[in-house]
């Protein structure tokens, strides 16, 4: 599980990445729809996997910037291949790391998202607090959970409220559960 989905590596990680590409497109589109980015937004994605949502976001924010944070070297390679043009154009940056220590200034981003990975964060409350630090006031955070990932963890809405997010809303879609919250 760790090498396939948590921090994908090796052959198991390649299989996990292939599965994410085959099955993740619908949820990536749904998350971007719920996030509703504007052309000039600066958006950060935590745990970007093979870069499906990054690709969609780069199209939605042609005058903005998309940053992805992921600890997996394999996923960096996959996302870089998928998003080479946006990276070369300077509209996208990929960073090796985790939500625990984001290397960004306070109030740097207009929106954030995490698809199928919040339940793998070692300390989700601390990760959400760190995300709040880099988000502008009023910024939207979207977290999504597909059935194959195990779905949303119990009490995750409360976790967002305890971290200081407001307007926490959960929606169920055929692709899975999507939570949105405001910083």
Image: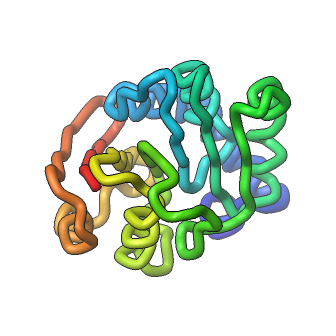
Q: Nearer the viewer, residue 45 or 147?
A: 45
Location of residue 33 (image quadrant): top left
Relative to 57, 71 lies left or right: right
Give the percent coordinates (x, y) of residue 124: 40, 73
The answer to whether any part of residue 167 appears in the image is yes
Give the percent coordinates (x, y) of residue 135: 42, 55
| Vertical side of 56 occupied by 105: above or below | below
| Vertical side of 70 occupied by 85: above or below | above
Relative to 82, 43 lies left or right: left
Q: Name the residue rendered at 44%, 80% in the picture.
A: 123
Q: Name the residue rendered at 71%, 60% in the picture.
A: 8
Relative to 92, 159 lies left or right: left
- In the rendered image, which quarter contains the N terminus? bottom right
Q: Name the residue rendered at 27%, 72% in the picture.
A: 163
Q: Name the residue rendered at 40%, 34% in the picture.
A: 31
| Vertical side of 46 occupied by 123: above or below | below
| Vertical side of 101 occupied by 60: above or below | above
Q: Nearer the viewer, residue 24 or 111?
A: 111
């Amino acid at each position: 599980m760790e090498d396939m989905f948590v921090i994908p590596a090796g052959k198991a990680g390649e299989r996990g990445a292939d599965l994410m590409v085959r099955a993740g497109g619908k949820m990536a589109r749904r998350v971007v729809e719920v996030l509703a980015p504007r052309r000039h937004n600066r958006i950060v994605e935590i745990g970007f996997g093979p870069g499906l949502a990054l690709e969609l976001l780069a199209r939605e924010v042609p005058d903005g910037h998309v940053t992805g944070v992921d600890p997996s070297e394999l996923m960096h390679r996959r996302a870089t291949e998928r998003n080479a043009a946006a990276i070369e154009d300077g509209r996208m940056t990929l960073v090796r790391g985790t939500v625990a220590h984001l290397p960004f200034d306070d109030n740097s981003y207009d929106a954030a998202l995490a698809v199928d990975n919040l339940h793998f964060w070692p300390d989700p409350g601390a990760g959400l607090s760190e995300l709040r630090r880099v988000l502008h006031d009023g910024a939207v955070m979207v977290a999504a959970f597909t059935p194959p990932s195990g779905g949303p963890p119990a009490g995750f809405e409360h976790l967002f409220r305890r971290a200081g997010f407001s307007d926490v809303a959960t929606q169920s879609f055929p692709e899975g559960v999507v939570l949105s919250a405001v910083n």
